[in-house]
Image (spheres, rainbow, N blue to C red):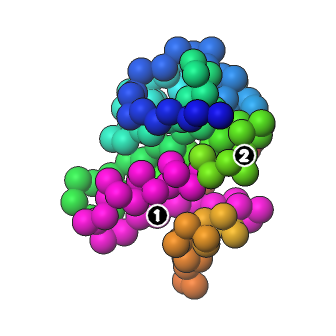
Amino acid sequence: MNIKYTDKHNFNKNELEELFLSVDWSSGHYPEKLCVAMKNFNTVFSAYDKDKLVGMVCAMDDGVMNAYVHYLLVNPDYQDQKIGRTLIEKIKEKYESYLRIAVIAYDNEMNFYNNCGFEKSKDASPMFITSLWT
């Protein structure tokens, strides 16, 4: 498999819907909104197998100190091939001069993020106001 990485921000709704629903994320039910969101993120790195979108990471930042990884997803058919790790490495390279890169990790993803260099906060917890169910 020859995975190609890109930093484009323009996607068609079908490829976003397919990728997000492949990992059972409820935001995949809003592909038009996802298209707009991708254009608005400061940073988007995506992984393609030929013309198929198989992975993506998106981040927001304040321009100098803080970056927040909002999405990291890899189609289950392509997991365990270091695609997620490569996408995180691209984020770490882009934001290497920043003082903080943050991510909210679901409990079953903690080991992955730990292995990528993230540490669980001892004194903070994520909080949400959301209508999404995953």
Relative to residue 88, is residue 123 depicted above or below? below
Position of residue 116 in the picture relative to residue 28 (left or right): left
For the residues marked 1 and 2, what is the alpha-carbon distance in whole angstroms?
A: 22 Å
Foreground of the two, 5 or 25: 5
Residue 89 shows which numbered tag? none
Q: Position of residue 5 (x, y in %)?
A: 47, 36
- Please provide the residue range marked out in magenta: 84-109
Give the quadrant of the C terminus.
top right
Relative to residue 10, is residue 77 depicted above or below? below
Position of residue 108 in the picture relative to residue 37 (left or right): right
Q: Type of residue at label 1?
A: Ala
Q: Which residue is mark 1?
A: 102
Give the quadrant of the N terminus.
top right
Q: Which residue is outermost to the bottom?
A: 122
Report whether residue 125 is seen: no
Q: Is residue 127 magenta?
A: no
Relative to residue 14, is residue 130 depicted above or below? below
Position of residue 23 in the picture relative to residue 97 (left or right): right
**At 72% from the left edge and 45% from the top edge, which residue is drawn?**
79
Mark 1 is surrounded, within 10 Å at the Cα level, by few (under 14), some (14 to 19) or many (20 or more) other residues, namely: some
Asked whether disc 1 touches disc 2, contact meaning CB atoms under 8 Å apart, the reply is no
Q: Is residue 89 magenta?
A: yes
Q: Earlier in the sequence, mark 1 or mark 2?
A: 2
